[in-house]
Amino acid sequence: MPFGRSPVRPAVLVAALVVLGACTSGADDSAAPGVEPPPALDVTDAPVDPGLGDNEPPSDAEIDAATDDRTAALRAAVDSFDVAPAAWADCGDGFDCATVEVPLDHLEPGGERIEIALRRRPADGEALGSLFINPGGPGGSGTEMVGWFTGDPRTLANYDVVGFDPRGVGESTAPSCSISLIDGPLPDFSPDDAAETATLDELWSGFAAECAASDGELLAHLGTEAVAADLELLRRAVGDETLTYVGYSYGSDVGLNYAELFGDRAGRLVLDGIVDPSASLTEVLAGQAAGFDAVMARADAACGSAFECGDGGLLASHDRVSAALENAPVGEVGPTELATAMILAGYDEGLWPLLADALVQAEGGDMSRIELLSDSYYGLVDFTAYVSVNCLDTPSPDDPAGWDAFTASMAEISPRFGPSVASDMRACAHWPVGTDEPAEAISAPLAPPILVIGTVGDPATPFGNAVAVAEALERGVLVTHEGEGHTIYGNGNGCIDELVSSFLVDGIVPDVDPVCPA
């Protein structure tokens, strides 16, 4: 169901549209979000904040005052590690690739090392430096993202775009254990009785046992704090004085952790689709359940005007298909695949017509498009890394009984989707690593201004997250996108793109929290 920290919107759209092809739905393409970008916001007269490169760095006394003992120890360990410069080599299609060694445990810099894979798209012009990017997940591949990252023309002209596979993902050192959620039907993630619940626990406990046996030590070091420490070493490996970064969705969590730990080395950070680090995993999932319930209600209300739906609307069509699949799955499609397809469509308004078509076909017995929507969703990230990071970053119930109670509470939030959203992370009841550390807000007192972009209709990282994070940061700038969907920078909104390019290229910080139309 929705990723615990959620994937970036462009990847979802690309994956779904490639596999589905040109579906006819009666929708007017001109109404799709981002096709006709609004007039760009004029930010040319906004002041340049002196915190973006021209000021004196914080003094040792200021750093000491803003750093607790644990952070100081981590910073000292990371600084003591002699990271090698990235040795770039041509890897085809105009890209360069490199591999950088980092400690498995940053607090033991002399111990075992792991590898982080990098891929670089050189700037179209003379580079100001490197722009690191992260697509979210957890478990999304940054090296793959470089191939489809659109950004904006000025930014691509002025920065070498560098994607990295976080530890545990893709071409970086990763666990050997895995699980396929594409070959269905999966157990019912909205269980109706003890037998269905036991089947779920059998799935997750078996996966957890395999990973504990094969990769237990690595799993314990896949948390977001370790990824942020890797990012600091990667900054040094490419030779940049400060970090320039765009992080989407879970990538915002990586950026926030970096700003908290290494704010004095931060340059221009842009976070889009905000994860609130003060929220526990169960709070994150509860917010997502409410968000997807609301976005599907908006999609249902659009039936008949923006696109055609089955009799009674999109939700009525869903309910009929769901009832049929509860009685008997069809091929590789059961209730879980249907819920996953619905949630995928919640990530972008442009997918609503495709979902409506898929439901109409499903009512006629053809589940192929439901299956493709579901499969494209689960194909977006490395699921082992996704589970590990979510279970390790913040507390959650560590036994099946705790997840039973949480699942019941999620049914009250969203009867259609809540239990499925909860069961997606039920693996944490069995996972070999977890945490008792409470989730805490991040203020990043040493960091310069940070752009915090929130979309009002975002179901995966609700807009309230962006508001809370911008308020918690000492220098957070809230950028509001009044539209639907999950993340927006690089998706054709001229207002957002100009704000970001002016910030990244010119160092211009808006003097007020700007609002961009859909």
Image (cartoon, rainbow, N blue to C red):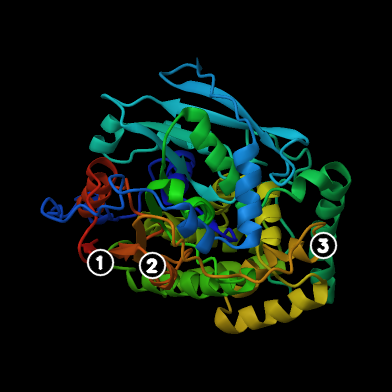
The picture quadrant where one finds residue 453 is bottom left
Q: Image height check: is 155 above or below 371?
A: above
Q: How far apart are labels 3 and 1 at the CA level?
A: 43 Å
Residue 371 lies, in percent from the top left, at: 58, 50
Q: Nearer the viewer, mark 3 or mark 1?
A: 1
Q: Which secondary structure lies at badge 3?
A: loop
Mark 1: which amino acid? Answer: Asp
Locate residue 247 relative to residue 188 in the image: left or right. left
Residue at point 39% right, 69% down?
A: 463
Q: Are marks 2 and 1 in contact (CB under 8 Å)?
A: yes
| Residue 164 can be seen, yes or no | no
Q: Which residue is mark 2?
A: 470
Of marks 2 and 3, which one's residue comes earlier in the chain? 3
Disc 2 vs disc 3: Cβ atoms closer than 8 Å?
A: no
Give the residue number, with chain letter if any, for mark 1.
513
* Mark 1 neighbour class, 10 Å CA radius: few under 14, some 14 to 19, many 20 or more: some
Q: Residues within 10 Å of mark 3 (few under 14, many from 20)?
A: many
Q: Nearer the viewer, mark 2 or mark 3?
A: 2
